[in-house]
Image: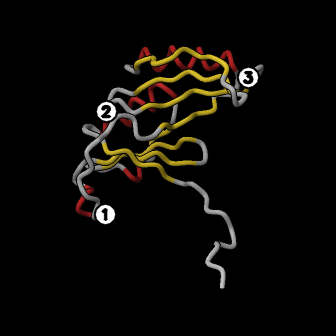
Amino acid sequence: MSLAPTLAPTLVYVTFLARDVAALAQFYVDALGLEEVLASRDERYREVRGGGCMIGFATQAVRPFIKLPEIEPVGTRAIVTFDVGTVAQVAVMAARAVAQGATLVREGQDTFFGQHQAVLSDPEGNVFRLSAASGS
């Protein structure tokens, strides 16, 4: 008997633990133009729509609720990538993000896997990439 799923799962949420959920959600609204999901708004949680995936920001108060143990952070543990459509938009969106408080880690450049990407970190240090197909 196989335990393999009949359909591949679909990624619908990514959640970051955050010191200031309101400020971090607002950063992604202002810097990248994502839409906040107001129905999910709470003092412990904020959520933005990032294309087909929701991005949540939760306070440490959620740890006991989901039975998540305290984990010592060890550098960058994840990278979120946003497709911005064209190579020119990578630079435009990177500049917009920096103007809203992001830190530019690496300017846009072509990668070995056919993407042109800029690497940034948000105001709480979470790393994200702005990406487009090379030559687009």
Residue drawn 34% across the image and 26% down it: 123
| Residue type, numbered disc 3 | Ser
Left or right of residue 79: residue 68 = left
Instruction: For residue 43, say whether it is visible.
Output: no
Residue drawn 61% across the image and 20% down it: 90
What number is the disc on residue 134?
Answer: 3
- Residue 82 x, y percent position in the rendering: 58, 34
Residue drawn 70% across the image and 22% down it: 86
What number is the disc on residue 23?
Answer: 2
- Residue 89 x, y percent position in the rendering: 64, 19
- Residue 11 x, y percent position in the rendering: 57, 54
3D distance between C-alphas at marks 2 and 1: 23 Å
- Quadrant occupied by the C terminus: top right
117, 53: nearer the viewer = 117
| Residue type, numbered disc 1 | Ile
What number is the disc on residue 46?
Answer: none
Please state which of the two labelled residues, at mark 3 or mark 1, is closer to the viewer.
3
